[in-house]
Image (cartoon, rainbow, N blue to C red):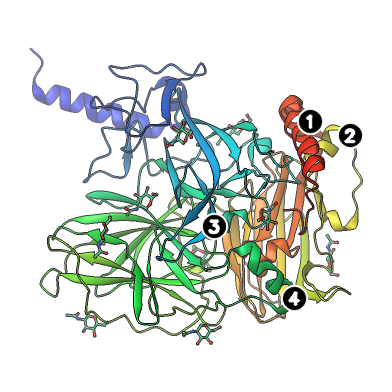
Amino acid sequence: MRSIFQSLVLALSAASIGSASPYKRADTTTPGSSDASSTLASSGTSTTSGSSGTPTSATSTPTAETSACKGNTADTRSEWCDYDIDSDYDTEVPDTGVTREYWLELTDVTVAPDGISRVAMAVNGSIPGPTLFADWGDNVVIHVTNSLTTSLNGTSIHWHGIRQNYTNQHDGVVAITQCPLAVGSSMTYKWRATQYGSSWYHSHIGLQAWEGVFGGIIINGPATADYDEDLGLIFLNDWDHQTVDELYHSAETGGPPQLNNGLINGTNVWTEDGVTTGERFNVSFTAGKSYRMRLVGAAVDTHWKFSIDNHTMTVISADLVPVEPYETTIVNVAMGQRYDIIVTANQADLADNFWMRAIPQVACSDNESLNNIKAIVYYGDEPSEPTTDPYAYTDGCDDDTLTLVPWVAKNVEAAAWKDLETAAISRTSAGLFKWTLNSTSMLVDWADPTLEYVLDGVSTFETDDAVIKLDTPDEWVYFVIQTTMTVPHPIHLHGHDFYVLAQGTGTYSSATTVLNTSNPPRRDTAMLPSGGFMVMAWKADNPGVWLMHCHIGWHTSEGFALQFIERESEISALIDSDLLGDVCTGWGTFQEEHEIEQEDSGV
Ligand SMILES: *[C@@H]1O[C@H](CO)[C@@H](O)[C@H](O)[C@H]1NC(C)=O
Ligand SMILES: *[C@@H]1O[C@H](CO)[C@@H](O)[C@H](O)[C@H]1NC(C)=O
Ligand SMILES: *[C@@H]1O[C@H](CO)[C@@H](O)[C@H](O)[C@H]1NC(C)=O
Ligand SMILES: *[C@@H]1O[C@H](CO)[C@@H](O)[C@H](O)[C@H]1NC(C)=O
Ligand SMILES: *[C@@H]1O[C@H](CO)[C@@H](O)[C@H](O)[C@H]1NC(C)=O
Ligand SMILES: *[C@@H]1O[C@H](CO)[C@@H](O)[C@H](O)[C@H]1NC(C)=O
Ligand SMILES: *[C@@H]1O[C@H](CO)[C@@H](O)[C@H](O)[C@H]1NC(C)=O
Ligand SMILES: *[C@@H]1O[C@H](CO)[C@@H](O)[C@H](O)[C@H]1NC(C)=O
Ligand SMILES: CC(=O)N[C@H]1CO[C@H](CO)[C@@H](O)[C@@H]1O
Ligand SMILES: [Cu+2]
């Protein structure tokens, strides 16, 4: 008879064999399918077994919203089926054989998230739009339909932070990877969740993302610290009673306008003439429990300090990179950045209600509701107005990047290719602000994506296409941006997590700036400090055309962007020319019929 000891020993040795030979696991195991209590959690989702893998074991459809791995419990968040938090997602990805399919529809809407009504654009009628869930390793297929019949806006959806490993065409950037999708048309994006954590999708044409076209992405996987419950995403948005498209003219001629308000997960209050409208977002805490929350910096031009009065936060992930957990009372959230935090509900003795705060930093944001972008965390049966005080802070557009220590450690090799570019602002003869990198302000044509050029074998580009070629496979690229202007910029790179080798104020000097190549922070969005520099690095391991840009909405539109054509000779083979051509043909007809004109940088 086999004793309980024997089976325990067997289980243990199986586990250690698993972690000793990580590269074998993708071939030999079948994670992602062990949750027996599965039901599809949201309509508009369908989960099917892909042809590429063999979903095995008892059941096959993990729930959309909860983790698919039984090994991943409140006390064992570092585990993930036969993988764990130490697995290197750059080299191994669970072969779940699962495909998640979503349908999203964009419409023109009228909304009043703070009680004041205005027009906006939404995904499936809500701002934020529906959250997309997947498990690490799943394939994700999203059908996007453009029904913006009033504004007649074209569209494209970018899956922010998603690696798009060898799937550049699905990056969703007009002028770069596709033409705008015409009203009345649909297109299908397909990518694999090679990393896990929290992110978001948003429109990548004009200022449409900040008209309301965005939503969350949660990819379930292991975590660097335990928690009881996952509360999901919390979006931090700025908000105005005029639309961003209405405000753009003044941004372009007079600089960033003051915005009225901000929203926490899509809602807030507004007081005018003594009348308060709207309602606050609220979160229920049970004393003793710990909660994971996933913060997303989704503003057009606001840098946040996020905090919950009298509570401490443990940061476990930044963008899609798990980090060594650290405690803090304030998290700095720049535009495009995400932070996963764990908060323990251990302050019930102090009060029943606490303020959750998103405070715009005056040094680089201009907001009328500086101290009233708040939500309520409550311990009792229902929320009521808190009386708690904020943590003290010094106003500043700080970046927490240099605090981050990636859990899966990686070093950076010597540069094979280097560039230093200076960010500056200039004015056109018409008096419009344009942001430049090395004196070039990007100006590309929506209807003429770079991928078309690559497919046609065109390899010379105009200066204002702002193209930089990275031809050598797997070479290490070092990229320095510096500025003397006293405006900080959140820099976002598509198709890669980049390593931050240095970040600071003053001037970069190849002789004296110390570069950290030993497991430096890595992520997809980090700050170029005001009057300072940032040294970024990445490996040219993903063929495609990848945009790099400032994530301040106004600045992208004002040309603060450039594109890397990475491994040009390998790109054509990865393109579905029918998909590219169909969307462009549809747009050509639509644009001509409605005489639509492009008024910005094109991205
Ligand atoms: C979004 O709306 C579309 C059609 O309007 C619907 O088919 C789909 O189920 C919805 N998707 C989600 C994720 O709710
Ligand atoms: C990225 O794609 C390449 C080519 O298909 C493949 O060799 C590599 O394993 C992929 N990387 C990840 C992390 O999936
Ligand atoms: C979308 O529509 C708005 C409102 O008509 C307009 O101001 C804006 O320029 C359009 N944006 C794009 C990208 O077409
Ligand atoms: C915030 O809104 C998103 C989208 O509606 C939702 O998925 C998420 O659960 C909300 N967050 C919380 C903490 O309720
Ligand atoms: C708390 O949030 C719920 C919706 O989740 C809302 O109905 C309620 O009005 C909010 N309470 C307060 C006090 O704002
Ligand atoms: C709660 O937070 C406020 C503001 O940071 C602080 O003054 C107060 O001492 C805190 N209360 C306790 C019991 O920690
Ligand atoms: C940008 O300007 C710097 C300094 O003049 C120069 O070293 C660098 O090569 C330029 N970059 C490009 C891509 O031309
Ligand atoms: C490099 O960055 C990592 C991650 O933030 C940090 O742990 C390490 O101390 C840094 N090394 C140096 C020399 O600054
Ligand atoms: C009401 C309020 O505090 N508004 C502030 C908004 O931000 C600007 C900075 O750009 C401050 O000058 C305002 O005082
Ligand atoms: Cu900028």
Q: Is residue 104 visible?
A: yes
Residue 253 is tagged as 4
Judge depth for marks 4 and 2 and give the one in front. Answer: 4
Crowd band around label 4 with a 10 angstrom C-alpha radius: few (<14), some (14–19), many (20+): some
Judge depth for marks 1 and 3 and give the one in front. Answer: 3
Image coords of residue 581 (percent x, y): 77, 30
**Residue bearing mark 3:** 119
Q: Relative to 439, is 218 above or below?
A: above
Q: Relative to 393, is 158 above or below?
A: above
Residue placed furthest toward the top: 1
Which residue is at a point 65% across and 57% down the rendered structure image?
537
* Of pointers 1 and 3, the one earlier in the residue sequence: 3
Contact? badges 4 and 2 (CB < 8 Å) = no
Q: Distance between the residues labelled 4 and 2?
A: 38 Å
Amino acid type, label 3: Val
Q: How far apart are marks 1 and 3 (CA)?
A: 40 Å
Quadrant in the picture for residue 269: bottom left
Which residue is at a point 77% across and 58% down the rendered structure image?
601
Which residue is at a point 59% across and 62% down the rendered structure image?
500
Contact? badges 1 and 3 (CB < 8 Å) = no
Amino acid type, label 1: Ser
Secondary structure under the numbered disc 4 in the rendered image: helix
Judge depth for marks 2 and 3 and give the one in front. Answer: 3
